Amino acid sequence: MTTPVKYVYSFAEGSRDMAALLGGKGAGLAEMTRLGLPVPPGFTVTTEACKVYLATGEEPFELGVEAARALADLERAMGRALGDPDDPLLVSVRSGARFSMPGMMETILDIGLNDRSVTGLAKASGQERFAWDSYRRLIQMFGHTVMGVDGDLFEQAIAAHQADDHDLGAAELARLTEEFKTIIRKETGEDFPQDPAEQLSRAIRAVFDSWNTERARVYRHREHIPEDLGTAVNVQAMVFGNLGAGSGTGVAFTRDPATGAPGRYGDYLPDAQGEDVVAGVRDALPLSELKNLDARAYIELGDHLHTLEAHYRDLCDVEFTVERGRLWILQTRVGKRTAEAAFRIAHDLRTDGAITADEALARVDGTELTRLMFPRFDTEATGRPLAHGVPASPGAAVGAVVFDSAEAVRRAAAGEHVVLVRRETTPDDLPGMIAAGAVLTSRGGKTSHAAVVARGMGKVCVCGAETLAVDPVARRFTTESGAVVHEGDTVSVDGTAGTVHLGALPLTASDVGRALETGLGTDPVTEAVLGALAHADSVRRLDVRANADTPEDAVRARALGAQGIGLCRTEHMFLGERRALVEAMILARDDTARERALAALLPLQREDFTGILKAMDGLPVTIRLLDPPLHEFLPDRTELAVRLAASAHPDPHDREVLRAVERMHEQNPMLGLRGVRLGLAVPGLMAMQVRAVAEAVTARLRDGGRPRAEIMIPLVGTVEELRLARAETERVLAEVAAETGTPLDLPIGTMIELPRAALTAARIAEAADFFSFGTNDLTQTTWGLSRDDAEASFFPLYLDKGIFEASPFETLDQDGVGRLVELAVEAGRGVNSRLETGVCGEHGGDPASIHFFHRAGLDYVSCSPFRIPAARLEAGRAALTDTEESDSR
């Protein structure tokens, strides 16, 4: 017998473990109710109901019955009925997805008011102004959210009264309410609904619909939230912070979400409803001011914050209301935080014994660590700032000032760095916030929309710079000193200090970046980062190597924790003045000339390899033989032809080079003469490079070093190619060994970067000591995409339409390219159980890809030096996933 689906749960029926069904907000309300906190009662309409609605366009039939029953229970608990003309129960209707999407979906407050009950509310509360203020809020929210009226029309009506809504009296608010109703009638052709039941049902549907708004879809795409989760809807008895000076509303954090420092942080706004704080339209007071306004509520709030952090064992974000001295807790969730705060909070909770070392590691990630390594402004060169504000999200950003989201997107798409400046942001500003390097507002605090969203995205943000007069119409802002900054002017935003400066300030290395290279850190954040990395290193299975082509890169990579070099690209050693030697080799008309050019290159290559092996002494260094097509070392064909045609006395050398360029011209050079093909086709090229490696190894051994060079043959598609290349490599190694009297036993492997190589890996493994997956080219050849061309043409369209969740060149395509990697690892080790496998494409530094490589059983990942700390961290986090899965079994 099938169990009936339940679509509505009272707060008393749920728990924190039901977030998938009740949404994060509903699960939090249920959990706080279980803990005995003062939560206004209510009920949650589940995400399953939303999924049915989105799929069919209709609510499930059972929803109406269950919601009516839950509403009746709520009315009994409150002793008031929805829409009662004498003493009405009012409810809020709020979205609540499984994962927090701050400001992206809809909220409607004060459901249940109409032309009759507003009078009853005035009498019951003893405050006529409060009643009319609540009614106009309902009509404004309902008209915009549910009935689709342009919100600016309501704001223009308020502005016509030449005062902020907070300054309007009861009579003015009553007139404004009638104006709002007229606007709705004019814009929609229907009246604002007077039936409270209709208000409630339409509000629930509007929240369901808001799951698919453009801003919600953009946010989900940005945060990688699945599209099919749907949102829950929370219906909760209203409590009122706009009942005069003894009331108010606020948002509190159990720790500072910007820095992670312990203590209570947040904002409080007297005589206001919750949306006023989030919107930032009025400047809130620091949370500490509540102690002076209502000491009892402040102490009680502190007790509840302590209870919630101890229960969730994490930073908690708490919304609350004080109604005539009585404290109510309206919401809690694990709070969004900056990268700095994430590391410090995890470290502090671990130190306090609240969480384990594994749990602390699971709460930070490589993306956050990378952010901490970005440069900061040089504080000694900042000078006098234009303005100070709230340091809502730390970091340093320089860009051109823009005053709306569309302009931010347009300029960013053209490659310009921008700073989005607003009085306060709204959810509609999300595209501009994504495009901008920093967000600056003249209103709001650490709990405003701008602050919360910017922290979640890792964007620099300064809020509440009150001395700035922002004029979006004139496209400028004016400072307290009278300075005028126009759109397009460059400013520097310091989200750590909360300051704004004119012009581009100089940058300096971050404290975390310096600490990672030295292993020393004195401030709480760097200590937390070093602690997290130490634990990651202790639990990870994957080694982390570097992609490095010079001794300098190798030294830095080792300082950052690299366990060797997974990719040394020899073609990068042929740039600059050496390019002429390569050109001479290409233009050689006979073997003698070619050998002369190769002989000139040999000592230069040997010197490079010697320096790199010294820097990585005792650690593996995988050296890839020349990979790109030789024509890349020659001048551009068109430019050279034009120069010759324009010259009255053409240079004979230029003519010779042009003939060589034309002789080597290929329609698709990346699939032409390169890699192992080049080594087999150009006599002496492979032998020269192998000899340079061998002689560098013997030189290091002679000097007492411990060189561990590995030779990698690129672009192999068949085992026969590898056998020929290996035979040539072993011949040269034997020659050098005989000449020096030093035995040389260097591993010889190949780069798997063609689908055929992956599919025939069992054969190729017969001739290979190791596989290194070149996932950049493997992605190109599997997808049939040119990385450079595709990313500049149709990639944005594919990302927007959801064909790609992320660029396959940034995060590995696990279903396609990843499957080839798994097949090759399994097949290769089936033939050679000692086969070492790694990845050397830049996917080796991507957090999501690292987790895949761990599951696929690779031995190491290799990435650019800058990404090594993040890769170490993610390799440790990947190992924790194995432990969790083992424990669950």
Image (cartoon, helix red, strand yellow):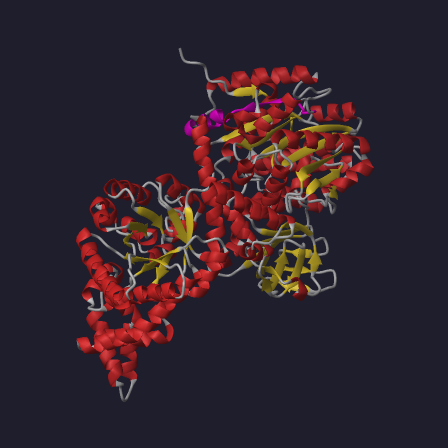
Q: Looking at the image, which is closer to me, 98 or 471?
A: 98
Q: Is residue 875 left or right of residue 729?
A: right
- The mark tally for this picture is 0
Residue 751 appears anywhere in the view: yes
Is 270 one of the magenta-colored residues?
A: no
Q: Position of residue 249 (x, y in %)?
A: 72, 35
Q: Looking at the image, which is closer to me, 452 or 514?
A: 514
Give the residues in magenta.
38-56
User: Furthest-top residue in view?
Assistant: 1
Is 48 one of the magenta-colored residues?
A: yes
Q: Residue at (34%, 74%) from the top-left corner?
A: 578
Q: Is residue 694 left or right of residue 478?
A: left
Query: In which quarter of the view is residue 633 placed?
Result: bottom left
Query: In which quarter of the view is residue 571 placed?
Result: bottom left
Query: In which quarter of the view is residue 308 placed?
Result: top right
Q: Is residue 451 left or right of residue 715?
A: right
Q: Looking at the image, which is closer to me, 335 or 238?
A: 335
Q: Say above or below: 655 vs 703.
A: below
Quadrant in the picture for the C terminus: top left
Quadrant in the picture for the N terminus: top left
Q: Looking at the image, which is closer to me, 153 or 596?
A: 596
Q: Position of residue 346 (x, y in %)?
A: 59, 40
Q: Position of residue 436 (x, y in %)?
A: 54, 54
